[in-house]
Amino acid sequence: MTLLPVLPILIPLCTACLGMLFYRSLRLQQWVSLFGAGALLVVSILLLVIVHRDGMIAVHSGSWAAPFGITLVADLFGAIMVLLGAITAAAVVVYSIASVDSIRKQYLYHPLVHVLMAGVCGAFLTGDIFNLYVCFEVLLLSSFVLLALGSERGQLEGAIKYVTLNLFSSAVFLSAVGILYGAVGTLNMADLSLKVAQAAQEGRDGPLTVVAMMFMIAFGIKSAVFPLFFWLPASYHTPPFAVSALFAGLLTKVGVYAMIRVFTLIFTHDVGFTHSILLWVAALTMITGVLGAASQGEFRRILSFHIVSQIGYMILGLALFTPLAIAGSIFYIMHHIIVKANLFLVAGVAHLIRGTSDLGRPGIVGVYASAPIVALLFMIPAMSLAGVPPLSGFWAKLILLRAAVDERAFLYVAIALLVGIMTLFSMTKIWAEAFWKSPGESADNENSHDDAPPAKPPRTPFTMLAPIAAMALLTVLIGLGAQPVFELAQRVTDDLLTPSRYIHTVLGSPDAAPSGDAP
Amino acid sequence: MTLNVLLAILVGGLFAMGIYLMLRRSIVKLIMGLALLGHGANLLIFTSGGLVRARAPLIEEGETIPSAPFADPLPQALILTAIVISFGVLAFMMVLVSRAYRAVGTDDTDEFTGTDH
């Protein structure tokens, strides 16, 4: 059982290697990929159950004691994130069977998805800040390839922007790690927590605040917060829908996860300074994201801008830094990963039925008229995203708003509410244009089509609908069973705000803690 | 100590050049900028890990720790990892840029507006 935290990294990696061995057989690759995604899902459920029951698990690779060896830590937060990642990956892999073309699959689409998952799970489970960098690079590199795979012009242009800004962020991250190591002489996150607190007490907090800001910029680019989000809407609408969904669900959330981890465990020495910057960032992220979405007319670009505005809510919870607010952030992440990935998957089906993703152009047929089930399946995550009760998004927003009211941060309450309404506006726009409107109503601009569309829309394959239905069901379940999910979020928060638990799990009991002083 | 100062200036220079090149409009200069930025970050780790002249971290016979002052091997291990990663990323970036050049027909980033509207 002690090796359990290693499995979520090992399984995707082995699946990827196995998939590459079956380079010639797409069918075998597909089965390996499905099996790997299933195994990851099972293991991550097991991990969450065990961590929930017995508390955090720390694994030291090669039995080199922390802080010298490389540590993997599965705490409740990490385990939940791994499970959410596994759910998204499973949905995307099933969805890809019919939606991703065979040329991309020939060029190792499936193995790349699993390499990405190895990086994502590694980032959630690592207990070492340099390993976090390595995991980021693993997931980034596979995401670069997934984004550019197919080499359409839009994809390449989007990929250049995505790659450049993410590599810049990696360089900042790496520099921050270097300076941090120079300042306190350790890279283990539990040990860093102790050393940074100690250094701050001794009044050596000048360089530490600088490093904290560098981490904020690095993770800010990755999680697409206010002034640093421009790569996201420029690239997320270009790859196949399955890839978009995977990115939208997981990649920015890895950044948010890292931000929450670092700013609850390590850099809490100057909360007044760092977290008040985060507060402004959160507010501006919410506003700019939702305004950006309002000006867009393409299905996935609207959704991409909404990722940005939703990230603002998650950062808001962290910035308020009260137990309730952080629980709100955790709840928000859980709700958001499911909902956002699902919306991109629905976008794929709508594109298949309408023949276009451009909301300004009339589709071949209205989705609502030809496939009312698909329209319903869009409605659930869309309303959840906007925060309509009783769906998951309502509770996520309610907890955050409650926390903000408790802190008397009424400005942020107002902004959050306004952004919620604007989100509803965007979702209604998509609903009206893509789902409700039937082409007969806009017959006059029918001749703007450059290619003659087939008269009947293609049937939506079952493998595309099943993951959407499953994730919509999950959204409804989180909404209806909000209390247990909220209790889970509260337990996560409790662990996050009591770093001593994390530290003791990694470094052993306080009296036996080895001293990791660099000479 | 002078070496520290020199390296600090070098790191700053690399970062400045890297960012300057990234701000240019040519995508080829973009790659060079990213490469220089990576080198700057690596040298930064090397410098901030502490510089010690000609003292390998070897443990003498009968001792359990090397006698201080010794060169900290960890930053070098970190740099090695980072170099390998940036090598792979750069190779990918080169292919991406050449494909993008062929698809768009120019190396001017101002023309890369296909995804902006």
Image: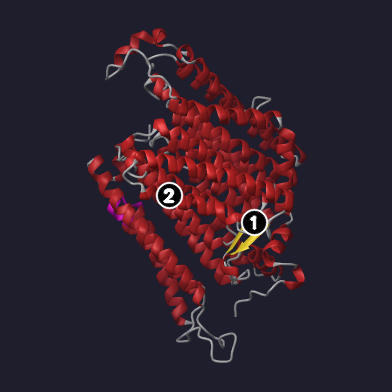
- Residue at left 31%, top 40%? B112
Mark 2 lies on residue: A16
Dominant SS of magenta comes to helix
- Horizontally, residue A3 falls left or right of residue A113, namely right
Mark 1 neighbour density, 10 Å: few (under 14) some (14–19) many (20 or more)? few
Residue A475 visible here: yes
- Front disc: 1 or 2: 1
Does A12 appear above or below A205? above
Q: Whole-percent x and y of residue A107?
A: 32, 44
Mark 2 neighbour density, 10 Å: few (under 14) some (14–19) many (20 or more)? many
Q: Whole-percent x and y of residue A510?
A: 75, 68
- Badge 1: chain ID: A
Query: Which badge, 1 or 2, is on the more N-terminal residue?
Result: 1
- Name the element at disc 1: loop
The magenta segment is B23-31
Kindly identify the amino acid type of the residue bearing the numbered disc 1.
Met
Does A286 appear above or below A272? above
Q: In which quadrant of the rendered image does the C terminus of chain A lie?
A: bottom right
- Residue at left 49%, top 45%? A36
Mark 1 lies on residue: A1
Does A102 appear above or below B90? above
Residue B25 shown in magenta = yes
